[in-house]
Image (spheres, grey):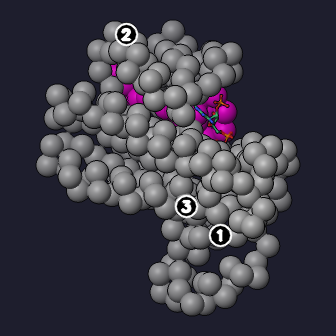
Amino acid sequence: MSFADKVVWITGASSGIGEALALEFSRYGARVVLSARREEALEAVRQKLVWPENHLVVPLDVTEPEQFKPALDKVLAHYSKVDVLVNNSGISQRSLVRDTSLAVDRRVMDVNYFGPVALTKTVMPHFAQRSAGQVVVISSLVGELPTPYRSAYCASKHALHGWFEALRAEEYERGLRVTMVLPGFVHTNVSVNAVTADGSAHGQMDRYQEKGMPADECAARIVRAVQQEKEQVIIAGREGLGIYLKRLFPSLYRKIIRRIKVT
Ligand code: NDP
């Protein structure tokens, strides 16, 4: 497997799965563009990569689309191309629908859905010009499995599937590839950073997150799927069986999910 001289742009590269992806891609020779809001954290990640001087930090907030074109210009000025865009930035949620403010619903959609949509639209003309490009979307099992206590998060991930599946169908003949990734529980700070009903941070490492797959293992499997240009990949432990349960026995899935403790 080689990504020699491929330019891979990763959002949410300052921690968790994004950081692990940056490291894994750098092992296979990629030039990595690291984006997220916290520039210092991105710099610290860059220093851990193989050949740190080969990689570029481009801070951006995915809820501020006016930052995207200048960011793309910076990447193109440095490398003259983008081969792979990994839409990984995201925030989760821990709160009941009845308690959650609409502002929180909107915020989660802004980060998890409109961010990837707007950034992808920004890079698309470049991909079209080259008749090539790959967009990787870090969705979640909850992109197919509605789960209590994370209604806005589920909705945002479901929305990604609709939009990016349509994009794939539209642009396939013009060389664009879309890889949807559905991780299960991965040991990162995603639950710590999750928003609650009033928008404050959950601040806790949840039980299932704690026992989740190591981020480096998840990243290694994502990179393999990207290399194989897979259209969709599930990266999970036993919780991944929920996908098949819901497809084959939807009523049973709904009964189980009503009772299950999901944090
Ligand atoms: P982390 O909380 O560790 O990482 C989230 C990343 O998103 C950080 O790098 C953060 O960087 C970035 N981010 C958050 N808000 C913004 C923003 N407004 N603009 C730019 N970047 C932003 O969690 P994970 O690594 O686990 O999450 C990565 C992705 O994986 C998410 O999309 C998540 O939904 C998905 N996922 C995670 C699972 C898990 O169990 N861990 C399971 C399924 C999916 P910064 O704060 O510097 O901006």
Instruction: Specify which label sits upstream in the sequence, 2 or 3.
Output: 2
- Which of discs 2 and 3 lies nearer the camera? The answer is 3
Tell whether circle 2 marks a residue whose Cβ is less than 8 angstroms from ligand 1: no
Q: Quadrant of the C terminus?
A: bottom right
Number of the label disc, if any, that sits on residue 155: 3
**At 36% from the left edge and 37% from the top edge, which residue is drawn?**
120
- Tag 1 or tag 3, which sits nearer the N-term? 1
Ligand 1 quadrant? top right
**Image quarter of the N terminus:** top left
Secondary-structure class at tag 1: loop
Whether pointer 2 and pointer 3 mark residues with C-beta atoms closer than 8 Å, the reply is no
The label shown at residue 126 is none
Viewer-closest of 214 and 171: 171
| Alpha carbons under labels 2 and 3: distance apart | 36 Å
Magenta stretch: includes residue 167? no
Q: Which residue is mark 2?
A: 78
- Residue 101 position within the rendered picture, expressed as x and y whole percent measured from the top left: 72, 54
Q: Residue at x 28, y 51 (%)?
A: 167
Would you place residue 16 above or below residue 198 in this image?
above
- The reply to whether the magenta stretch includes residue 9 is yes
Amino acid type shown at disc 1:
Thr
**Residue at 34%, 30% in the rendered image:** 122
Residue 147, label in figure:
1
Residue 90 picture location, percent across and down: 60, 43
Q: Which residues are magenta?
A: 1-23
In this rendering, the answer to whether 95 lies above or below 51 is below
Q: Earlier in the sequence, mark 2 or mark 1?
A: 2
Image check: 200 left or right of 47?
right
Q: Nearer the viewer, mark 2 or mark 1?
A: 1
